[in-house]
Image: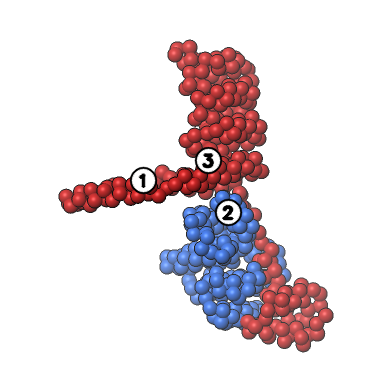
Amino acid sequence: MNSNKEIEALIEKYNNGETSLQEEEQLQNFFRGEGVPDHLKEEQAWFAQLDLRAKTEWEGFSEDKLFAKLDAQVKEEETKVVPMLQPKTKQVWLYRVAAAVALVLVGFYMGNEIRNDDVAGVKEELAQVKAMMLEQMTSSSASGRLQAVNYSVELKEVDQEMLNALINVLETDDNMNVRLKAVEGLAKFYDEPSAKKALLKALKKEKEPMIQIALIDVLVENNEKAALDDLERIAEDGNSIKGVKDQAYMGMFKLKEM
Amino acid sequence: MELQTFKSQVLPVKDKLFRIALNMMRSVEEAEDILQDVMVKLWDKRAQWGEYRNLEAFAVTITKNLCLDRLKSKRMKGHFDIQEMELDSGTVSPYQRIELDDSVKTMVRVFEQLPDQQRLLITLRDVEGYSYEEIAEQTGLEVNNIRVGISRARKKAKEDYLKIANYEQQ
């Protein structure tokens, strides 16, 4: 395709930092081919090692690990403790009073400013966040689902749609950690009849020891007598592992006591 | 929202970032270590994502900075001699371990002994194929200086290679 002269001229240009990306590609292709003359051997070696580097990938990468780490990061930020500053002089109180007065004034002002359509905007935004979480709960990555469930756990209020999504996760998700988080989420809204029902149902079906234990804890904590039969069954079940059995015995004991 | 952005814009460039870190640090372990920090830092700065035309350039900049910082602090601690550049025993580039032609093997070594800045520029241009404008955005250098640096690196690599080859022939 290229005569040696052309290639040599191109190399010269390349070494001077004057080639375009296209021309560099052309050189790379030339040196990948057969029949490179001997006196261009170091050029070939150069392009060969570049090629090698370009093909390298991050083999040790794990998406789950990364998102677990980012998740931990977010939690850490939320719980960061800010030390209180000690007031140095009594004057500080003056500033505080002034700040409080200013705050009240701003509050009144803002209160008058906020109109109904602002409230509607906030509501809409909340709805969007919710929709994203619901979608994320069916994502293909376990860490993604875990994160979505996590967000929902932190909500102060839920609606039936969100509860249903959590229940669905508890009943169908393949990943143990995601289900475990869903137990935690539903436990928070135990007063909701559907949450309570789902947790009782899960106790009947769940085979994963970690989750069985979590379920037992939640139900016993809420003094749920309806769980007694299942606790007895688990405690007597030869297939249950010891930790789960112990927990079930303990639960029965506590429920009968209370 | 941010998680989606992170997934759709940062994850696809993870291999590029890894290659940059690897070519700078010359050890998989250290490159992975740096990349963990890069990811956390990117996530930390999510409030600033909007300021960047593309997240990729921002991610490259963070990677570059962390690598240069780490190399500098290693040097301050006297982990390795600047001129001799014998890599400290803990770090062995993965390319030194694979079966290669002698000439390529020598060139791998030559590349790894180029000055930090030159390794960075060659990686961005010759390995990742970024345009000079993109590299300017990532490094904060002027296009002209980038060209000069790259030209020097390419010439130096071949000089060093010939020196080694001649020496070994004697």
Instruction: Give percent across and percent down for residue B109.
Output: 61, 71
Q: CA distance from mark 1 to mark 3?
A: 21 Å
Q: Secondary structure at mark 3?
A: helix
Q: Which residue is mark 3?
A: A151
Q: Determine the CA span between mark 2 and mark 3.
A: 17 Å
Q: Are marks 2 and 3 on the same chain?
A: no
Which one is earlier in the sequence, the residue at label 1 or at label 3?
Answer: 1
Image color mode: by chain
Question: Mark 1 sits on what residue?
Answer: A81
Residue for point 63% across, 36% down? A175
Task: Count the marks.
Answer: 3
Type of residue at label 3? Tyr
Quarter of the image holding residue A129?
A: top right
Q: Residue at x 76, y 74 (%)?
A: A29
User: Which SS class for mark 2?
Assistant: helix
**Residue A51 - label:** none
Outermost residue toward the top in this view? A256
Q: Residue at x 46, y 68 (%)?
A: B72
For residue B6, the mark is: 2
Q: Give the image quarter of residue A178.
A: top right
Q: Which chain is blue?
A: B
Indicate the amino acid at tag 1: Val
The image shows residue B127 at horizontal and vertical percentages of 65, 69
Left or right: A226 in relation to A103? right
Chain of the residue under label 3: A
